[in-house]
Image: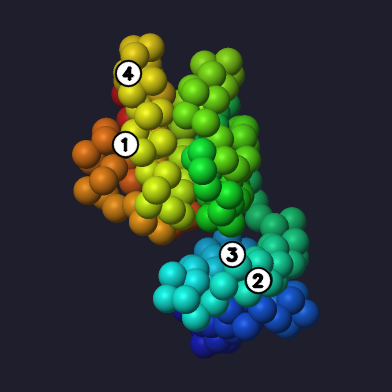
Amino acid sequence: MSDLKQTLLLQLADSVVNMDEKMTVELAQTYIENNFNPYEGINKGLAHGMDRAGELYEEEEYFIPELLMCSDAMYAGLDVLRPHLKLDKLGDNYKVVIGVVEGDTHDIGKNLVKIMLETSGFDVVDLGRDVPPLNFVKKAKEISADIIALSTLMTTTMEGMKAVIQLLERDKLQDKIKVMIGGGPISKSFADKIGAHYAEDASKAAKLAQDLVQEAQQ
């Protein structure tokens, strides 16, 4: 990786953490002018900055107003980088239902995963925030989804993820519709315990989704 690219990625992350919307836009424009990969700019720059902001929130260094200003900076950068993304086409129209589980309204991580999935060629239906488990399953059945992607930043709402899987099992759909989960408190061991697939961050979520639909084809 070139020194300039590495520097710009670090500065993009810093500008998000520093809540500097204007600087984020300027850096994103410089990044694109140098023909650097916009996908990496989002993942290793903007998203990395948002992850760091999330850690500061967990440590109670930042609170909701700071987190919102960080996300404003991130979205401003996204507006610059996103038009330069090249969509990968998976061949078939694979569908994902995505949302934040009931009781939680933190949607920054979910929004990033949605962008990465769309970039990877998935049709994504976004149910938004604070979504009851039954709504995920209803929508997945309605559109014949291949994957349900669930996000939360709160330990208190993790049970909602398990509820989605139980509803799929009830309807004998657990083999047909894969469930991906992610977010601050989520771990691989929790995912394994409830029968879900775990993605550590937005770009890994997109790769995992591709792997899951390809496995299903075999």
Q: Which amino acid does label 4 sit on?
A: Glu
Residue 85 image-quadrant placement: bottom right
Residue closest to the eye, 84 or 134? 134
Name the kind of residue labelled 2 in the image: Pro
Q: Which amino acid does label 3 sit on?
A: Ile
Q: Disc 1 and disc 2: Cα gap in Å?
A: 33 Å
User: Where is mark 1, residue-wise?
Assistant: 196
Residue that appears at 26% across and 46% down = 190
Q: Distance between the residues labelled 3 and 4?
A: 36 Å
Spatial CA distance of label 1 from label 3 is: 26 Å
What residue did someone put label 4 on?
169
Q: Position of residue 193 (x, y in %)?
A: 22, 39
Q: Give how far across and how far down residue 49 sits, in percent.
A: 54, 73
Q: Name the residue under label 2.
A: 65
Q: Which of 32 and 108 is in front in this view?
A: 108
Q: Nearer the viewer, mark 2 or mark 3?
A: 2
Could you tell me which secondary element the residue under label 1 belongs to? loop
Residue 22: quadrant of the picture: bottom right
Residue 42, which numbered label? 3
**22 left or right, relative to 133:** right
Whichever of labels 4 and 2 marks the residue nearer the N terminus, that label is: 2
Q: Which color scheme is applied?
A: rainbow
Residue at image location 62% in from the left, 83% down from the top: 18
Earlier sequence position, callout 1 versus callout 4: 4
Q: Which amino acid does label 1 sit on?
A: Ala
- How far apart marks 4 and 2 lie (CA) works out to 40 Å
Which residue in the rendered view is the most extreme toward the top? 171
| Residue occupying image coordinates x 58% and y 60% | 39
